Amino acid sequence: MDGAWPMARRFVLLLAALLLTACASGPRQAPDATAGQRELGARIATTAHAQIGRPYRYGGRGPDAFDCSGLVYFAHAAHGIAVPRTTADQFDAATRIPTSRLAAGDLLFFRFESGRKVSHVGIYLGEGRFVHAPQTGRPVEVRRLDDPGYRDRLAGTGRLH
C-alpha cells in the first residue's frame, strides 16, 4: 500500500497538467504557408498575372484564352502541379485556408448562383487583389477582394500547392 499512494498522486498531477495544457492552448489555427509554399505561390500568382488581357473563353485553359478554372489549371501546370480542371473539383481538392492567412497563389472561390455550388475561382495576388478570367467579353483581369461584386460572394479560400 505504501507504493500505491505516490503512484496515484503522480497520476493525478499528470492528469491535472494535461488538462491545464489543453485548456491553455486555445483553438487551433491553420499554419501559415511555409517558405517553400510562399515562393511557389508567388510564382503561380506571377504566371497568372502575366495572362492579364488574354480573352475569356468557356473551357479555355490557355495559353491563348481562359475560363476561370482554366487559368488556375494553367498557372499551376506551368510549375509542374497537376490540379483538377473544374472550379467545383478545385474547390473540393483545395486545402482550406482562412482568409486571414491568404498568401499569393492561394485560391478564392465564389458563388454567383443560388445554392451551395461554387461557380467562380480566382488566384490571390496579395494585398487584397486577385487575378481571374471573369466572363465572356471580359479578359483576364485583376480585381480587389473588397469589390462589392466579389466581397459578399466569397464562398471559401484554399491552396492547391
Image (spheres, rainbow, N blue to C red):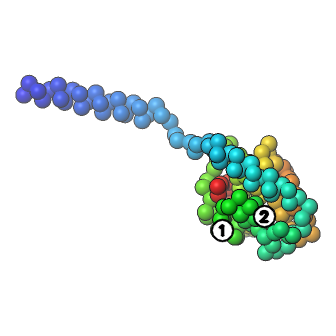
Query: Residue 117 lies in what quarter of the image?
Result: bottom right
Tell me if I can see residue 111 in this picture.
no
**44 w.r.t. 134: above or below:** above
Residue shown at 80% from the left, 42% from the top = 127
Q: How many marks?
A: 2
Q: Position of residue 4 (x, y in %)?
A: 12, 29
Marks 2 and 1, Cα distance to the nearest angstrom? 12 Å
Q: Position of residue 131 (x, y in %)?
A: 82, 55
Q: Position of residue 52 (x, y in %)?
A: 88, 58
Q: Position of residue 136 (x, y in %)?
A: 88, 71
Q: In the picture, which quadrant includes the N terminus? A: top left
Q: Name the amino acid type tagged 1.
A: Pro
Residue shown at 74% from the left, 61% from the top = 78
Q: Name the amino acid type tagged 2.
A: Leu
Specify whether 70 is left or right of 6. Answer: right
Specify whether 17 is left or right of 34. Answer: left
Query: Residue 16 lies in what quarter of the image?
Result: top left
Q: Decide: few, some or many residues near mark 1? Use Cα within 10 Å; few <14, some 14-19, many ≥20.
A: some
Residue shown at 24% from the left, 31% from the top = 11
Q: Are marks 2 and 1 in contact (CB under 8 Å)?
A: no
Q: Which residue is mark 2?
A: 71
Q: Secondary structure at mark 1?
A: loop
**14 w.r.t. 113: above or below:** above
Lower sequence index among marks 2 and 1: 2
Query: Residue 110 lies in what quarter of the image?
Result: bottom right
Q: Nearer the viewer, residue 131 or 114?
A: 131
Tell me if I can see residue 94 in this picture.
yes
Q: Nearer the viewer, residue 80 or 38?
A: 80
- Residue at the farthest left position: 1
For residue 84, which numbered disc appears in the image?
Answer: 1
Q: Decide: few, some or many residues near mark 2? Use Cα within 10 Å; few <14, some 14-19, many ≥20.
A: many
Residue shown at 41% from the left, 32% from the top = 21
